Image (cartoon, grey):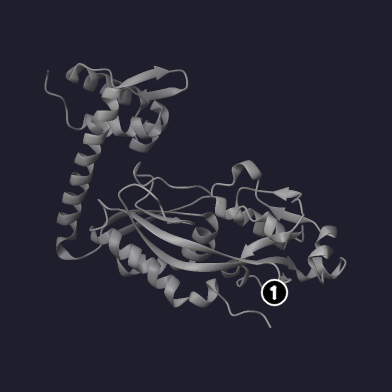
Amino acid sequence: MADFNWNDLRFFLAVARAGTLTTAAQRLRADHTTVSRRITALEDALRVTLFERRPSGFTLTPQGERLKQTAEVMESAALLAQGMVADGDLSLAGAVRIGAPDGFGSCFLAPRIGALCERHPELEVQLVAMPRVFSLSKREADIAISLSRPQEGRLYARKLTDYRLGLYGTAAYLDARPSIRSRADLRGHSFIGYIDDLIFAPELDYVETIGEVAPRIKSSSLVAQLKATLAGAGLCMLPAFIAAGEPDLVQVLPEEVTITRSFWLIVHEDLRSLARISMTADYIADLVRREQALFLPPPTI
């Protein structure tokens, strides 16, 4: 077996996680031909085939799966060593990627994250606010905000908060349509909700809570649903922490149509001890704790 370039493991992990050369190259900020060449060089040095090349992309062989486990251990050790050196002066430096549902990320975290960066000028915060589940094992994020606690993997999870959702519409929309005094009255109204096959977490499937209604306007993005609601397109289930910032919104049937969900903060065990990760996680938790009333407002009387 010939000696191989240790740096080739970075390219190997990127392809293993992305599944295609193009996506891996984008994440590595390299040319896809360079990525292909490095993978071939690694296979030649190890004298094994690490990937099955298919039209749909790259799939790990059994040998590739075994190498991936070892390479991830090496990657974690390298990240930890890098963090220990960088954190030696107790200052926060480097990048922290936060993956969060678009509602929490865009409407709550984005307006408040700037204070952390002002406090630590060398810190770079990458906020990925998208309606999806983030894989920490694939390094899609350093910190993930999830709607549920993970059931497997080497992950550290702590509950941020419960949060309440209710049914909302604009005052103008409600004034122009029949009044709503009970669930039965909802049948004559337009609804905005998620696209059924694009719901990324079962906790977001709450149409049954409203009753026998079928949204006519659907989006995978909660922010898009909010914008449609504010434009008077219909009624929508929205988190209280989002509705609180929109004075045009009025809650409908607050005692009958309300549900509670949870936010969890998740960090990979390998990164938990890094100062920039742990302090960013603590900052998010402190934000939520200080503004708890936004997430769980007192009942409407």
Q: Position of residue 169 (x, y in %)?
A: 74, 66
Q: Quadrant of residue 60?
A: top left
Given residues 47 and 8, the one toward you in this image is 47
Please indicate whether residue 207 sits to the left or right of residue 99 in the image.
right
Position of the C terminus by quadrant: bottom right
Taking the image as shown, residue 139 lies to the left or right of residue 246, namely: left
* Relative horizontal placement of residue 296, taking residue 97 as reference (left or right): right
Vertical order, 51 against 286 (above or below): above
Mark 1 surroundings within 10 Å by alpha-carbon count, few (fewer than 14), some (14 through 19), many (20 or more) = few
Count of numbered badges drawn on the protein = 1
Q: Is residue 183 visible?
A: yes
Q: Amino acid at mark 1?
A: Glu
Quadrant where the image shows the N terminus: top left
- Residue 18: x and y in percent read 39, 33
Name of the residue lying farthest toward the bottom: 301
Residue drawn 30% across the image and 23% down it: 62
Left or right? Give the position of 4 relative to 161. Answer: left
Q: Looking at the picture, does residue 243 appear above or below residue 1?
A: below
Residue 42 position, x and y percent, is 22, 22
Res 113 seen here: no
Q: Secondary structure at mark 1?
A: loop
Q: Quadrant of residue 52?
A: top left
Mark 1 highlights which residue? 255
Residue at horizontal 18 percent and vertical 45 percent from the top = 77
Q: Position of residue 131 (x, y in %)?
A: 54, 49
